Amino acid sequence: MATNVLEINAERLWESLERSAEIGRFRDVGLRRLALSAEDKQMRDLFVDWAKTAGCSIEIDRLGNIFARRAGSDPSLPPVAIGSHLDTQICGGRYDGILGVLCGLEVVRTLNDRGLSTKRGIEVICWTNEEGARFSPPMMGSMAFAKVLPLESVLATTDEDGVTVAKALDDIGYAGPAPLGDRTFDAYLELHIEQAPVLDREKCDIGIVVGGYKTQALRLTIKGDTGHAGGTPMAMRRNALVGAGYVIAAVNDIGLAFAADEGRTTTTRIESFPNLPGTYAEQVKLTIDFRHIDAARFVAMRKEVDAAIAASAKKANVEIDVEEGWRWGSELFAPECIDLLRSTAKELGLPYREMRSQAGHDAYAVATMAPTAMIFTPCFEGISHNVNEAIELVRSVPGANLLLNAAVARANR
Amino acid sequence: MATNVLEINAERLWESLERSAEIGRFRDVGLRRLALSAEDKQMRDLFVDWAKTAGCSIEIDRLGNIFARRAGSDPSLPPVAIGSHLDTQICGGRYDGILGVLCGLEVVRTLNDRGLSTKRGIEVICWTNEEGARFSPPMMGSMAFAKVLPLESVLATTDEDGVTVAKALDDIGYAGPAPLGDRTFDAYLELHIEQAPVLDREKCDIGIVVGGYKTQALRLTIKGDTGHAGGTPMAMRRNALVGAGYVIAAVNDIGLAFAADEGRTTTTRIESFPNLPGTYAEQVKLTIDFRHIDAARFVAMRKEVDAAIAASAKKANVEIDVEEGWRWGSELFAPECIDLLRSTAKELGLPYREMRSQAGHDAYAVATMAPTAMIFTPCFEGISHNVNEAIELVRSVPGANLLLNAAVARANR
């Protein structure tokens, strides 16, 4: 390695991850730390405390996004930002999002250890409600920050108990005074566990993320009519749940058919009404999504999904309304940032592969307003959104060092 | 007609149905009058008031089952009971259950009009929570009365808001002093809309119900594992909702395959966890049922359903636990009561057909403790458990007159 190469303190990073893993512990090894919950507040407080101890100034915006800045030598220049999230899924793991924030903090701590200053500041960001497990949609904080979502509608969004985002922010004291989105970044870097098994299986420790899978979510409203579970002849039935069943089966079959060339389909949320044992459903809401690495194949998938929905509607004698949900494309990240990661990895002698993200990330929204790229690190078998999410420290450190050195290089540019 | 033939007052019956249709009116033409709700209380109060005005004594048992008795000339003899229910589905109609109770009341009123006394009393019964729309299972009041369900577990059953049956009974003042099940009936007759389109389509106004379809409900617990909707390769997924989708599709296909010879399959209630857009389901609970008029074909259906569940589990890479839910058989009713209905119909010159019920009814539980039979009357196209449930008065009166004359004949036996 070149003499000017920096290395993070792996033990300290691990200790911080372990501290985080105590806050909202769920089913022994996992986390349930829903956005803006008491556990989220506790973790936020700890992060703010750590960041202040590391000499950072803290700003919090209206949506509770936290910006912890280590000042640069030229305060007139926008900082290099490093961010991710501290909230988890309802049966989540310890690393999804959290590793990225704590690696950002570790960058600051390492610079402090070495007494190094950078020309541009380094800003570590925790985005609010990336997971969308309590308040929908996911990536709420970063999307509102990037003006992809309007602030007022986000504040009015409610959880299952009818609590608004505005109230939840007040309750935990994280409705900050900083204006939303009124910040510029020289660049934005995000490190994240891959949440897919490619790096783990290929024994490669670094993924340089050049973009995302083409992804489209669809929210279906399946409209039938209630009727008696016993007496209604099969031919007269318009059971919305049967429509949903045919869609779920067909959409999964499409995913299996496209699996060999990196296609994915998922059916996730379902809500049925009236959802009672003696009567069948007049309406079902169903969320599905499909993803493909290749744009042309993605179009082919869409065609098959549309045909499957139409065929299911006909077979179940129901109507299906299709509303487009979240969608993101393939070319997300800035060539200048991708090049920076490539050249830094080469300089550090770190093997990497280039890849696309199959998941959504805060980086997608930030990429609309600042040059952005992501680093992936391996997680066991790609298991994520599951308490059994696992990483090996030794396989996470190379990515963290890439983040550190790339951020410093960019900050000193 | 023979000179001793009695006829109900059709206009008065219709007026009573119209009064009932105002209590819990839902979506203009329907009813939402959930068991033990404020609307149920209002309807119960009205029924009790009507019954008292008609000279009945009222007894209410621990579960709120109401017994309105018109005394017979020999008080030592058990009464002839006529019952059904006043609660409705969540998007229910005006006649399901209600017609049966109000025809019972009309029997009493007609006897009063004529100044006729009977040897045995006539007891009109409203069973609590037949529908199961607020508290599960359906037919709760009659099943607990017949000791098919234990009282304590019924009282502890909660609705979606955690309110117990015991509390709901207290709240509306219908936890009565009469001991549960401590009554004998000389016979039990129940008139009900058919809830299937046979009578309507055949232009026949009376169905003498000789039994029920063989019916079996299954409660499935589909066990997979949560994971990330984007990153998890198709082959690694254990999406419980996909398992449910395959089951729903296959079970409906089985229903369609058996439809020509009177088979039915239904999938009704579904609950998925965690039911969030970015992560797939680790567990889904699904209720299905299947019915057939023929016992051997019913066994064949069960075989196909079991095979479909196993195949769905394999295809979706999930486990499916199967718990048997409600179940009833084909030979439910007492030959002596069926014969009484047949001979009375012939005497009255009323055309009828014999049939089996496709739906569940309070009569099934009562049949375990008293000679029982049912009368079906037509409803438009068999639509039921739906606000558009509709009857024609002129086509309901023959069944009501059959009930009246059969009950009186039995009571004077």
Image (spheres, coloured by chain):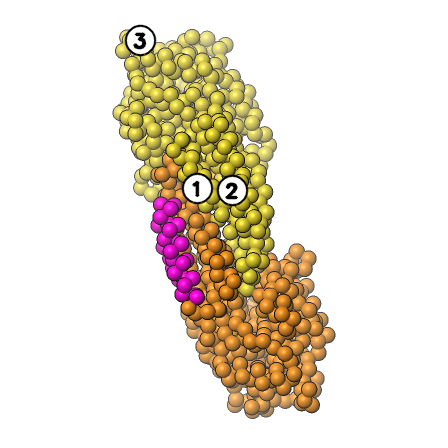
Chain colours: A yellow, B orange
Q: Mark 2 lies on which chain?
A: A
| First along the sequence among labels 1 and 3 | 3
| First along the sequence among labels 2 and 3 | 3
| First along the sequence among labels 2 and 1 | 1
Circles 2 and 1 in contact, beta carbons < 8 Å: yes
Tag 3: residue type? Asn
At 43% from the left and 21% from the top, the residue drawn is A210
In-image side of A289 versus B2 (left or right): left
Q: Which chain carries label 1?
A: A
Residue A179 in view:
yes
- Numbered mark located on residue A4 in the image: 3
Q: Quadrant of the N terminus of chain A?
A: top left
Q: How crowded is mark 2: few (under 14 residues within 10 Å), some or many (20 or more)?
A: many
Q: In which quarter of the image is the C terminus of chain A?
A: top left
Residue A16 in view:
no
| Magenta stretch encompasses residue A360 | no
The one of B51 and A259 positioned closer to us in this rendering = A259
The one of B135 and B259 positioned closer to us in this rendering = B259
Q: Main secondary structure of the magenta part?
A: helix
At 43% from the left and 73% from the top, the residue drawn is B147
Tag 1: residue type? Asp
Q: Which chain carries label 3?
A: A
Secondary structure at badge 2 equals: helix
**Can you give x and y, in whole percent of width and height, for residue A48 in the image?**
41, 26
- Numbered mark located on residue A308 in the image: 2
Q: Which of marks 1 and 3 is in front?
A: 1
Q: Which of marks 2 and 3 is in front?
A: 2
At 53% from the left and 46% from the top, the residue drawn is A312
**Can you give x and y, in whole percent of width and height, for residue B271 in the image?**
46, 50
Please give the residue where the numbered disc 1 appears in the rendered image: A253
